[in-house]
Amino acid sequence: MSRLQKRETLRQRLLTIIQHQGEGSKLPPEREMSERFGVARETLRRCLEELAQEGRLIRRQGSGTFVAPQTQPWIKPFALRSFTEDMRSRGLVPSSRVISVAEVQAAAKQAQKFKVVPGSALIEIRRLRLADGDPMALETAYLVRERLPGFDAQRLAHESLYEILEREYRLKIHSASQQIEATVLTNEEARWLDVAPFSPALVVERQVIATTGEAVEYGKSLYRADRYSFELDVMRAPDARGDGGA
Amino acid sequence: MSRLQKRETLRQRLLTIIQHQGEGSKLPPEREMSERFGVARETLRRCLEELAQEGRLIRRQGSGTFVAPQTQPWIKPFALRSFTEDMRSRGLVPSSRVISVAEVQAAAKQAQKFKVVPGSALIEIRRLRLADGDPMALETAYLVRERLPGFDAQRLAHESLYEILEREYRLKIHSASQQIEATVLTNEEARWLDVAPFSPALVVERQVIATTGEAVEYGKSLYRADRYSFELDVMRAPDARGDGGA
DNA sequence: AAGTGGTCTAGACCACGGC
DNA sequence: CCGTGGTCTAGACCACTTT
């Protein structure tokens, strides 16, 4: 009913004001706005608090309510990117070198992840991934053979796996679970990545899920610690299980 | 000291009730509780809403307010957590050992991050963070002195920084930018973490933003690679910049 | 001191769920 | 129907910031 409508319409009017006024500009006092909008101050305040929580407004006691600068505090939600997309977004030119392509049988653990019967054929692809021509990551990926008829792994030297999957196999990628660890490189890994043995590296294990719910890819990447870092913005979400045991 | 916030004491009383009653049990009606606690119904409601938001209570219009079952669905949208909250969510018992507390002057880079003038007083806190009694991370945190009058860093040995900031300083944490890297530990770092020198570690640099837009904390943590990994689920980016406008 | 947001109050009415 | 939580109100007073 128009009861719930009240805060909703109020929110829209406030958003209009926010967009209309410039960043950093001051809003009228609460008491003035509440009167102008024909609404109780508490009702207005609920809206203002909500907008502040979303990062659109900044409220300062004793000072006023201001339109938040849209520049920094705005969150760029962390998105799933392929290596190719990741490097491009960093302004680097990605390329790949296929180290090996093999057909392997799914071990129990892998079969479980892909939801196939153990022993099913998997494509194992090892690639050295370069940025601006220099080694950046060493990657091992597993795909389910039967889901990708006629797949030519050699194309991965110059094309993005996700793009091929999405464009040619109509597999729409939904999400991924990633696990990020640190490690030191073995001699062989270090050679590929052109760094000293025992150099640090980021390990990213990734399981990619299609919109169908199927596991599309399982991969493990070793990133050179001196060239790569993960950046991620996260919102505060109070699902914290902390009773101040004091 | 100023009069304690009613909501704070009220929250504690409600938490006691929640812990005392079993999961799924029903709380008394709002009107009854507000009278019993000598507080207005709206005040009580704010607390109840907060606890519901945190997942401790379930509120059903027309039916009642219930203690939430602690067995939660295992979907974990990645959220900003303090070390304390992080460890608890992993089923470990967090503790801390304060290594040093110092007052330092903000260097140019730090001053810029905190948006204060260079040379402003910062609190530097180094802590060894333990899980189930074993070293897990080595953390250095910086806070702006003038924004936290009367702050006692020693309390951090047993309390969560974020909880203190949110409860007592009314600093509502909005989000954080994190950068994750890999490194190998120096001799001193390795000693604190009780691992061999040159062991791998995850480096997490974190800048925490309040709803006011201010930088609240800047911290750098070294996590033992053999005990800690970052897990995050990410959606495939549809690349939509959705302004709530409509 | 004036002005602003922050908290709290007592009470009204609305919307939903169950009896 | 009654009891529950959900929304809204008008006003009081508090705490902080600025003048």
Image: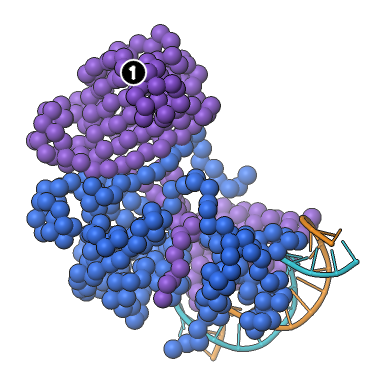
Chain colours: A purple, B blue, C orange, D cyan
Question: Dividing the image into 4 quarters, which one contains the C terminus of chain A?
Answer: bottom left
Residue B211 placed where, x, y %? Answer: 46, 62
Residue A43 placed where, x, y %? Answer: 67, 67
B37 to the left or right of A116: right
A73 to the left or right of A223: right
Residue B171 in sight from this viewpoint: no
The residue sitting at 42% across, 29% down in the picture is: A112
The residue sitting at 16% across, 40% down in the picture is: A184
Q: Give above or below for B70 relative to A98.
A: below
The residue sitting at 37% across, 44% down in the picture is: B231
Crowd around label 1: few <14 · some 14–19 · many ≥20 (10 Å) = some
Q: Give the structural element (helix, strand or loop) at label 1.
A: strand
Q: Within the image, what quadrant is residue B40 found in?
A: bottom right
Q: Give above or below for B220 relative to B152.
A: above
Of B179 and B36, the residue lying toward us:
B36
Residue B224 in sight from this viewpoint: yes
Chain under label 1? A
Q: Residue furthest top?
A: A150
Of C10 and B70, the residue lying toward us:
B70
B15 to the left or right of B92: right
C10 to the left or right of B242: right
Q: Amino acid at mark 1?
A: Gln
Residue beneath disc 1: A105
Q: Give above or below for A32 relative to A118.
A: below
Of B105 and B161, the residue lying toward us:
B161
Question: Dividing the image into 4 quarters, which one contains the N terminus of chain A?
Answer: bottom right
Q: Within the image, what quadrant is residue A189 found in?
A: top left
The residue sitting at 9% across, 55% down in the picture is: B187
Of B162 and A78, the residue lying toward us:
B162
